[in-house]
Image (cartoon, rainbow, N blue to C red):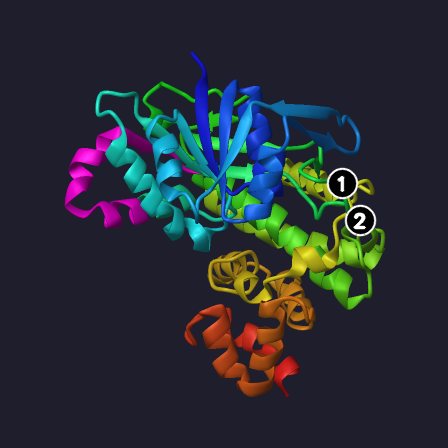
Amino acid sequence: MTKKAVHFGAGNIGRGFVGALLHEGGYEIVFSDVAGSLVDAINAADSYTVHEVGDGGRDVTVTGFSALNSSEAPDAVAAEVASADVVTCAVGPTVLKFIAPVLVAGLRARVASARPLQVMACENAIGATDQLREHVESLAGDEWPDLSSRAVFANTAVDRIVPGQPEGAGIDVTVEPFFEWAIEQGPFDGDLPSIPGAHFVDDLGPFIERKLFTVNTGHAATAYHGALAGFEKIADALSDPDIEQKVGSAISETSAVLEQKHGFAAEDLAEYRRTIIERFKNPALPDTVTRVGRQPLRKLSRHERFIGPAAEAAERGLGVAGLLAAVDAALAFEDPADEQAVELRAKLTSLSADAFTAEVTGLDPSHPLYVPVRDVVARHTA
């Protein structure tokens, strides 16, 4: 019997990472997206290729898929959810609330005796699946006690660099060979989904934070330092020893937090950092500082990749100079095509250093990180 997965978000990550692994796990895939032209392009194709570029890379051909426009045919998507084995998403944390109504409708139509739907949100956020479940519970209201037995929700930590794609690629996707997909196994009660290469863990929290506070912190730090130095590509930025040192300093500070907080071994974290830097240096990935640096306001917020680990470091009396240097570079980021970058410039012009720090970073004036960050901000608001 064919297994089916519904995946929300048919973009490059959806096709080039999640979709590719679900295909290898034997699932027929139904992509759901709001971009009509992308949905049409997927439905017009019998296959697409995931090009892994760099050492050990291979081409993976994905077949057995279709796509639905969730803005035009939500009932059709809900019907697919009702009969699916797995639901995944890669839509961005702020979009989770918009897919929740379709999930509720799908659970409502699902046969009560069917195997529980396995739901996993594949987002760059801590507890993203929990957030999705909360949206579903809230919408279900009084129905939730009945519907709750029809699905299990498991948090995940995902990691694969999927850069901006070359012109004319169609629905093919270029990615790096490396990937990591860690999934908490408790919710499945032993009935694990078939996802080749994924590893199932008892406690996902440390893995999520290790990824977010090393990969995401390092990637963004490279983008902002690289943009400030005039580089276009991520790999080229890290060819500059000064930038590599600055990025290394930032993620060494996050590693110090991870070591104290979660008990990771220092030598294991050092090796993890070396692997991350080498991945960023992959010259075959056409990734730009502009793409990685976009949405700077979100990346400067309280629980994100800079302020989040820096706040925990400050609370523990650990160093934060490298993270503050990355914040400094982020505050200089400019991209007229990115709405948040434009808004960042406007806030720096219109707000005092204290007002900006409170509003954008969410730090309380009594927090030990507040004054150091405020002093960095002041260099951009003066």
Query: What range of the chain is rendered magenta?
Result: 134-156
Q: Position of residue 332 (x, y in %)?
A: 69, 73
Residues at badges 1 and 2 in contact (C-beta under 8 Å)? no
Q: Nearer the viewer, residue 274 or 381?
A: 381
What residue sits right under mark 2 in the picture?
235
The structure residue drawn at horizontal position 66% and vertical position 42%, both measured from the top left corner, is 162
Identify the amino acid type marked 1. Glu
What residue sits right under mark 1 in the picture?
278
> In this image, 265 relative to 235: left or right?
left
Q: Nearer the viewer, residue 69 or 283?
A: 69
Q: Position of residue 15 (x, y in %)?
A: 60, 35
Comparing labels 1 and 2, the label whose residue is closer to the camera:
2
Name the element at disc 2.
helix
Residue reaching furthest to the left: 142
The structure residue drawn at horizontal position 59% and vertical position 69%, both measured from the top left corner, is 339
Residue 136 drawn in magenta: yes
Q: Quadrant of residue 296?
A: bottom right
Q: Main secondary structure of the magenta part?
A: helix
Quadrant location of the C terminus in the rendered image: bottom right
The structure residue drawn at horizontal position 26% and vertical position 29%, both measured from the top left corner, is 150
Q: Is residue 307 above or below residue 96?
A: below
Residue 218 drawn in magenta: no
Identify the amino acid type marked 2. Ala
Q: Which mark is residue 298?
A: none
Residue 145 visible in image:
yes
Q: Quadrant of residue 230?
A: bottom right
